[in-house]
Image (tube, grey):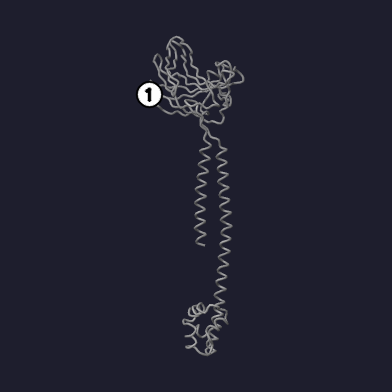
Amino acid sequence: MLKFYRNALAAFIATLLITALVIYAGIAKSKLNASLFPGRDPDLLWAAAVEPPSPIGKTQLSVKNDVGTVEYDFFLDSEQQFPYAHYTLAFIDAVQPYRLVDLTRYSSVSFKILCDPKNVLLLVLFSFDEKVTDINKASTRRVSSTAFSCDSHWSTVTIRFDELDTPYWWLGRYGFEHSDTGYQLNKTMGFAWVNSLQSPLNTPSHVKLTDVKLLGTDPRYIYAAIGLALGLWVVFFVWLFRRSVTVLTADIREKVKHTFSAYLNKLRLTEAARLLSENEDANVSEIAYSVGYNNVSYFNKLFKTEYGCVPKTFKALYPLKDPEQHNQ
């Protein structure tokens, strides 16, 4: 039984470790990570665009670098009522300048950004709206956004898609209710980094942007890992049950066999003792054979254990006596 317990413990630990590895692999596999920049996912092709494409008054945006890190400068003219500048990643394909992309597999967008001077920008998601959007006219895209802060130190910003709302100005422009702030993530047209009302005016602003990624979770891998882990434990408990039944049965048989052998030896040795005490001329070997022992040495050993002396000594010490008395 001790060997069985050791094997069962080893099997339990092995199953536990395999379960941990399976769950870890499932969680790791479930994490979705699609790079938009600087690496580019082939299923998410995009082209860069800026606004305004040419200066409007003093308001302007110019791209300084787009290899490894996007770097751009912008300037907002205080003479304008709502000066507007942004850098855009617009999804495209080989046929048309805009493409509708399904991002429902993803839950958030992450990027690293640096702003000098300190700024408050908007992350804007452009999406298709059946009521107003013309896919070839960028100005008709639905706008959904949220604000974030950045300064002269690199920081990682992660924004969940459920944090984005369509602003009231866009809803009012196209006659939507102010409660209709949602959008269709399965018809995404691109992202933009846009100045906010808190962005400094009449101040040269510099922005660096990199490591733009879409993040999400595919729960199917987690469910599969849990299912596999449960299957492993079912196999373990079935093995444990069957093995325990086998070992227990063998143990019971061994105990029964041992008990029967001990009882049989007791009967044989009692008969041998009787024959030794009743037959003065009896030969030890003959008596051993007569009660069922083919090995005289083994017989002598058992006899000595039972009566405290070898058969020859017993015969000399206890002639013609009841052998049952010798056991008392």
Q: Residue at x 57, y 58 (%)?
A: 243
Q: Going 50% across and 54% down the picture, which residue do you hit?
A: 10
* Closer to us: 194 or 43: 43
Residue, far top: 57
Q: Picture coordinates of residue 152 (x, y %)?
A: 38, 24
Asked whether, in this view, residue 204 is left or right of residue 306, the answer is: left
Q: Is residue 127 above or below residue 309?
A: above
Question: Which residue lies most toward the right here?
Answer: 130
Residue 102: x and y, percent? 58, 27
Q: Is the residue 110 above or below the residue 264 in the image?
A: above
What amino acid is labelled 1 in the image?
Answer: Ser
Residue 309 position (above or below residue 211): below
Residue 325 location in percent, x, y?
Answer: 51, 86
Instruction: Identify the residue position indicated by label 1 in the image.
Output: 152
Q: x, y (%) of residue 273?
A: 53, 84
Question: Dot 1: within a 10 Å radius of its alpha carbon, few (fewer than 14), some, or many (20 or more) residues?
Answer: some
The answer to whether residue 52 is above or below residue 33 is above
Q: How many marks?
A: 1
